[in-house]
Image: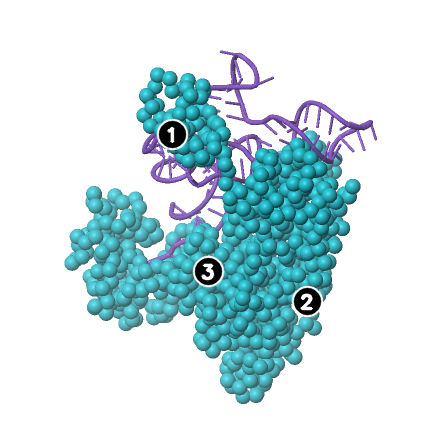
Chain colours: A cyan, B purple
Amino acid sequence: MKRYDFSEIETKWQRLWEENKIFQVKADPSKPKYYVLEMFPYPSGRIHMGHVRNYTLGDILARIKRMKGYNVLHPMGWDAFGLPAENAALKHGIHPAKWTYSNIDYMKKQLKKLGFSYDWSREIATCDPEYYKHEQRFFIEMYEKGLAYRKKTLVNWCPTCHTVLANEQVEDGKCWRCGTEVTFKEMDGWFLKITAYAEELLEDLKKLEGHWPEKVIIMQRNWIGKSEGAEIKFYISDIEDNLIVYTTRPDTLYGATFVCISPEHPIARKIAEKKGFLNKLQTFIEKVRKEKREIEAGLAEKEGLFLETYTIHPLTGEKLPLFAANFVLMEYGTGAIMCVPAHDQRDFEFAKKYGLPIKVVIKPKDRDLNPEEMTEAYEDPGIMVNSDIFTGLDSIEGKAKITAYLEEKGLGKKKITYRLRDWGISRQRYWGCPIPMIYCEKCGIVPERIENLPVVLPLDAQIDASGRSPLPNLPEFVNTTCPKCGSPAKRETDTFDTFMESSWYFARFTCPDYTEPFNKEEVEYWLPVDQYIGGIEHAILHLLYARFFTKVLRDLGYFKIDEPFTNLLTQGMVIKETYKCPVHGWVYPEEVSPEGKCLKDGCGEQVIIGKSEKMSKSKCNVVDPDKMIEKYGADTVRLFIAFAAPPERDLEWSDHGIEGAYRFLKRLYNLIIDYSENLKKISYISEDFKNLPNNLLKLRRKLHQTIKKVGEDFEKRLHFNTGIAAIMEFLNLLQDTLKEVSLEKEIVKKVLKECFEKILLILSPVCPHIAEELWKELGHDTFISLEAFPEYDSDLIEEDVFTLVIQVNGKVRDQMEVSVETSKEEIIEIVKERPKIKKYLEGKIIKNVVFVPKKLINFVVA
RNA sequence: GCGGGAGUGGCGGAACGGUAGACGCUCCGGACUUAGGAUCCGGUGGGGAUUAUCCCCGUGAGGGUUCAAAUCCCUCCUCCCGCACCA
């Protein structure tokens, strides 16, 4: 008998799919579309299990949607710009482009080996000028609309990578890639005005509720960080100017006893100049800058520099001392705050340190507050006191009342503030998309002409040991002429943050070869992405930027949609247990003896089995997809990954588990091959299945129940694990049934053929190769990948008998098979006489009988 | 500190408020074998007994709602993730 030769089977079908272009799609308005997208990979060299999981989940969905009659767009591409290419250039002397393209080559082969149903004709690499030229155009259009601008800012600087990092690329003060301590540097850079869309980005999160993980929505909401408050004017007579502070607690205005501003606030400088302590201020600024990290971590003590001046309280006219303080951020609000120590913990600590007065203006409903006895600020709402005409008001009401009063007097106004900052997109890197701007001595900043795009990244550049971008040193790149006046000019040498490329790739997949950015018909047919799948690590940045781009491109007239991704699935990590030797640290499983001793250098120490963690080389717990495919085949790998855990949860890699998946496929293969010769010519229609013997009826019923469950679990719930469990369950029943039937009978063959065919159909999204092969063995010459998902017979799946659970006082005491025809009354009579139940009812009064049709009956007795 | 999620056998995990532990793994026993780390069959939450049968206990802890709770409500514990001087 034929052995399950997965390698031969898989290569063959992958070849046939490709030759027949069966996964290439075209827009077809007569068919419902479905766009499945997995986050495209960075071509780092080889795919890892996380990719395998991500793409397996997407592929199962794409395949079942195809079978359910959708016109499915399922593309794949490469997020090809980025730092690792330059690092590789430094380390191995390979040009980033060469490195990137050879990685793409390799990884593409790996993905093909996994049998993913991508339309490879739509492949995109973002480092291709034909891709990024459109991005340059978007940028210019944004610039012309005032959505892109240049400003000087204090930026995070990684001394190792020689680059600016976004706030979000800094993790606890360290570079997210290399781990070096990040410093600060003042630099000019380009920014996109994402804050102009803050309100819409926040508001539209409501449209995603129920379709995106709640967690992601909350994270984005917090990131945008909307707060409502007031801006209030505090006059400073020394400089005859108003200081504007921002507060969310205008109700505590009467409790303000001092005012703090950021040391970098222009007014601090102005005062210091006037009062002659500029040096002292400068020293303070530097100290604060140095401590920025600790300050942000909440570790540094609050510290202030008295500016030797006072502000005038807008309502009481009191003189309040003015400080420059290390905890006031220049970037948020107005960079200045009024301090109410009685009702703000930070102000309280500051006041205690510098002996500043504490004035209570809000009291709890049930008690009084005494400033001298307070050990912490009272931050909750309450009743307003010591607040002139507002005394006695509820503080929540007081907020609006005081704001209105200030507004009336021209002393302040209502103000909404967002935590979200504009997006700094300049990177001092080589391997990225050139920013299409030109600096002309006469005309200033001038965008490149659209017709001159792309501004091509020169590939003949050499990356030297410094690791710095070679672009500024390439005269043929830098020197150009001004598009406006024609005089000599210089190009911008920074490149875009690579989050730019991933902010719109999903749309380009609809028309990857179109000369203009987007083909209207394609974009309108395919967008938005119906199901987006990827890791939670992109919960904020990538997803927020893509949402932002979508809105901008909409406003530039390219799209009609507001949101790019209708549904989002964030899949869990692939984790594996770790082994740690007290001497050698993390060790590979091969370095551990069966007794758990370390085998490295004959060490012999007892190895500690650590908890399961995300696969990483440093922890020696990686599993190589190539090796797994080689050993078990792609179908087994896909099956195990889909079966081992629900998609959103972490998946624990198990060497035994994958054996189990392999065993299942072998069992299926052997079973069908065993019967295939006999069944090839068999055909059936539903009429054939009337008056079946009981065991075959049960088998068919189970089959149709399984079809229903798998359809729902795969397509609607995306819980592939339970669907696969149902298929396994069915196979178990099928094998049991086969032991008691004779293949001599025609009807048995018909039932068997139906079972085999349909089980292959429903398994095919998960294990497409073996499904194709066995489909052929059963006599078909079509691609199972293009077959329709089977319908289930809804009359058949209705059981005619069911197992009635019999409870007494909520405890299960007995159960019996009952026909669905039996009435409640009949059931009660029968059940009461059953000995096990009788025993519990004897001498008791039946107070109530709860009857759940087709499920259970519960006697409540006393 | 704030926000979110999760705690179910030896393990991964199933369970519209209705038989807890589907399915798989592990382990144990058996069959077939020169052999088995292949394959097949059976068993596998804990405890107990009068052991082909039956009983009790069990979903992090404690309370509550309900005829009925892993599931709903309250209090608490543990773990994971995100944010964190945002005024």
Secondary structure beneath dot 3 equals: helix
Q: Are marks 2 and 1 in contact (CB under 8 Å)?
A: no
Q: Are marks 1 and 3 in contact (CB under 8 Å)?
A: no
Q: Are marks 3 and 2 on the same chain?
A: yes
- Disc 2 to disc 1, C-alpha distance: 79 Å
Instruction: Estimate how packed mark 3 is, as few (under 14), some (14 to 19) or many (20 or more) residues with alpha carbons within 10 Å.
Output: some
Instruction: Estimate how packed mark 1 is, as few (under 14), some (14 to 19) or many (20 or more) residues with alpha carbons within 10 Å.
Output: few
Nearer to me, A437 or A570: A570
Q: Tell me which label, 1 or 3, sits earlier in the chain.
A: 3
Nearer to me, A677 or A455: A677
- Disc 3 to disc 2, C-alpha distance: 38 Å
Please tell me whether mark 1 or mark 3 is closer to you in this view: 1
Instruction: Estimate how packed mark 2 is, as few (under 14), some (14 to 19) or many (20 or more) residues with alpha carbons within 10 Å.
Output: some
- Left or right, A410 with respect to A436, comes to left
Name the disc covering residue A289, or none.
3
Instruction: Identify whether A807 is placed above or below A420.
Output: above
Nearer to me, A564 or A276: A564
Q: Could you tell me residue A466's position as x and y percent? A: 65, 65
Residue at horizontal 54 percent and vertical 64 percent from the top: A31
Instruction: Identify whether A659 is placed above or below A318.
Output: above
Quadrant into which the C terminus of chain A falls: top left
Please tell me whether mark 2 or mark 1 is closer to you in this view: 1
Does residue A219 show up?
no
Residue at the spot of label 2: A97
Secondary structure beneath dot 1 equals: helix
**Chain letter of the residue beneath label 3 in the structure image:** A
Name the disc covering residue A825, or none.
1
Residue at horizontal 72 percent and vertical 62 percent from the top: A19
Q: Are marks 2 and 1 on the same chain?
A: yes
Instruction: Identify whether A37 is placed above or below A411.
Output: above
- Left or right, A323 with respect to A449, comes to left
